[in-house]
Image (tube, grey):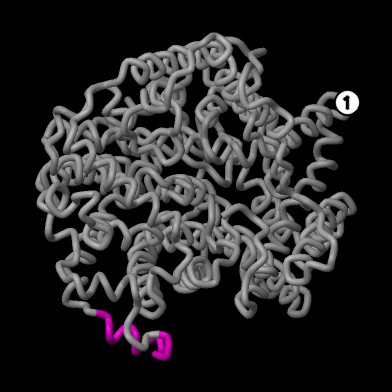
Amino acid sequence: MATENQPTTMSDDAKPKEPPAVGHRIRMRAVLLGSALALAICLITPFNNAYRQGTPLGGGHFPLAPFYFFMWLMIFTAVIRAIFKGRNLLTGKELLVTWSLMVLLSGIAWTGLARTFFINITAPYHFASVENRWQEILQPLLPQSWYPQSTAAIAEFYNGLSGGRQMGWLEVLGNIPWDAWLGPLLGWAGFVLLCYIVIACVVSLLSKQGLYIERMNFPLLRVPLLMQEAIDNNELGRFFANRFLLAGLLVPVCLHLMNGLNFYNPSIPSIPTLILAGKYFPKHGFFSGFYKLKIYIYPAFIGFAFLTSKQISFSFWLFYIAGAVLIGLLYFLGLNIPAAALGITFGPTIARPEEMQMVGAYLVFFLFLAWLARFHLLDTLQKGFGLKKDTDPGQEWLSTRLAFWGAVGGGLAIVLWCHYFGLPFLFAFIVVGAFFLFTLVATRVICQGGIAYFTLTAAPLDGVMAFFGTKFFSGVGLVVAGVVQKLLFVDLRESLMPSLLHTRKITDKARNNRRIFTVIMLSLVAGVVLSFLAMLALSYKFGVRELGVDWATRTTVAVYDDINSLVESPAEPSQWVTIFTLAGGVVMLVLVICYHRFYWWPIHPIGYLTAYSSAMRILWFSFFVGWLFNALCMRYGGVVLFKKLRNFFIGLIIGDFLMAGSWAIYGLFSYSSYLVLPG
């Protein structure tokens, strides 16, 4: 079994291994508690994030509100046990399940869905102008059933109801023009839930590969799992009293206490957590790639980096630095490729042609993952077609056969849905396949790499257009592909699949996994409904113009601008885009071969996938510090020192989230909110 600091590899003759026997049972009180708290987060998140512009309650894949509730639930449960001897209100495992349900739904309420959804289905009408010519070029291509066909309803959505600020929330809901919204909401909710079903089936099918064959470390689960172990052993007090943990906890507490007080009272001194290091590098020349270098100091992410395998954390910051060096090297060699050579792209952060390396890298890494899982995939096919039987299907969310046909049937339904609205049938297969390919690879990066905050560089459609251009798409097809991608498959900071895989790990070996899965799916349905209601009510009460959704508006309008440009002037694959795409594939091929064949190889290939991600611009220094301490600890103190020092970095994580949650609560009752974590 791979340790926390060893690469997880798999030999050529590795065969699917059956999971261990089924163990404990999760009581429904834990599942229902988690669902109730998760739905409460869905209701309050838009108000906190958009109107109050406070610390995001559900940002990333280790969101604030769920962990904050989890900590206090742990303490409350321990106190109840101490007062009422033998009273086991909730076990540690049950508290973990409660936490994981909150994590699942917290993303739906914001960037995972609701943050851009309503702007996505109103922007082409509200932002149409004489200059952009959307009315004559874009609007005739839009499927009418996708959009509210009422200019008055859209105008009130952006400007707010007349007198809306003085209305109560129920009164606002009563004054929303539901006749304009009901059709689009029902259609889109059905499509979103269909995608969620396919994602759940895929996770149920493929989770064995990571859990039992490769035995992934899941760094983002390390702290919750250690807390669960402490409370199940009745040692939660000893866990929090550990001197290393207390020392680590004091660092973010003191840091954010001072900086938070400074935010509300500038006369109090503050400690800088952002260093603009780019000013020390020239704008041109070999080091020009570092001209905008920034150093962000986030104690929690340093803690996550320490808990991640040092091979992975080393690769993250190394490839970020290497990406900046490449920019300077190309400039030094006279290959100053203009951004215009990139053409029109849908990537959320892509800005330079060399960043298209990620398209080739994603494709090759996906093939590598498929090759690693070849025996498991063969076993899955045999069980899916009834040639083999599950040895113990009760321990899975779904039987292999049901999950297999759910994924196949659901995936085909998504393809047919896209084709029905205008995407050519062959390209519907290719586009939907690209969507899930990118999501699967990103899930691996997040769950194995321990990145709580991750963004794509290039979008799935960028990969399709890099190989085929846009001439095979119809104008309507471009609209369908671009809008669906923006809805669920490009803003992956809070995507569902990584959180589902974490939940699958937490519920592993539970005797009532089927019942838990049923509650998960019902909670997802309720989460979508409540998130839609909360965002609609907030928008009609205050108006979108008054909310902090500039990023959502800007990126959504950019998508429609890009579609409009491609409809007017279809694009062919760019030479430079093709070159860098192929180069990225070659580099990734070398990396995966070396990683798999040479045990001493120090670089993990998933680091290359994050080289140009905007997330790594924020987190590279955290991974550098975490890797440095991890490497020094293992080099000079071994496992014994690692286990002691680990508590210090756990303290960094707990302290950061404790202060973030406390300031978020204070911000709800103040004119503004001090931000502890990246938004």
Q: Which quadrant: the C terminus? A: bottom right
In the depicted structure, whether residue 189 falls above or below residue 171: above
Q: Which quadrant: the N terminus? A: top right
Which residue is at a point 68% across and 34% down the rendered structure image? Answer: 278
* Element on which disc 1 rests: helix
What's the magenta region?
Answer: 165-176
- Does the image show residue 43? yes
Q: Which residue type carries mark 1?
A: Tyr
Residue 394 inside the magenta-drawn segment: no
Which residue is at a point 12% across and 36% down the rendered structure image? Answer: 474
User: Where does the image place residue 232, in percent across and percent down from the top left?
Assistant: 70, 59
Occupied quadrant, residue 69? bottom right
User: Where does the image place residue 558, in percent across and percent down from the top left?
Assistant: 34, 46
Main SS of the magenta part reads: helix
Which residue is at a point 45% across and 69% down the rendered structure image? Answer: 547
Residue 166 inside the magenta-drawn segment: yes
Q: Residues within 10 Å of mark 1 (few under 14, many from 20)?
A: few
Q: Is residue 271 left or right of residue 3?
A: right
Occupied quadrant, residue 579? top left
Q: Is residue 638 left or right of residue 411?
A: right
In the depicted structure, whether residue 164 falls above or below residue 103: below
Q: Which residue is mark 1?
A: 636
In the depicted structure, whether residue 575 falls above or below residue 455: above
Residue, far front = 131
- The total number of labels drawn is 1
Which residue is at a point 18% across and 30% down the rendered structure image? Answer: 570
User: Where does the image place residue 366, in percent across and percent down from the top left?
Assistant: 40, 26
- Of residue 24 and residue 532, the one placed in the foreground of this image is 532
- Does the image show residue 31? no
- Of residue 539 and residue 443, the one placed in the foreground of this image is 539
Occupied quadrant, residue 116? bottom left
User: Where does the image place residue 399, in percent across and percent down from the top left?
Assistant: 32, 45
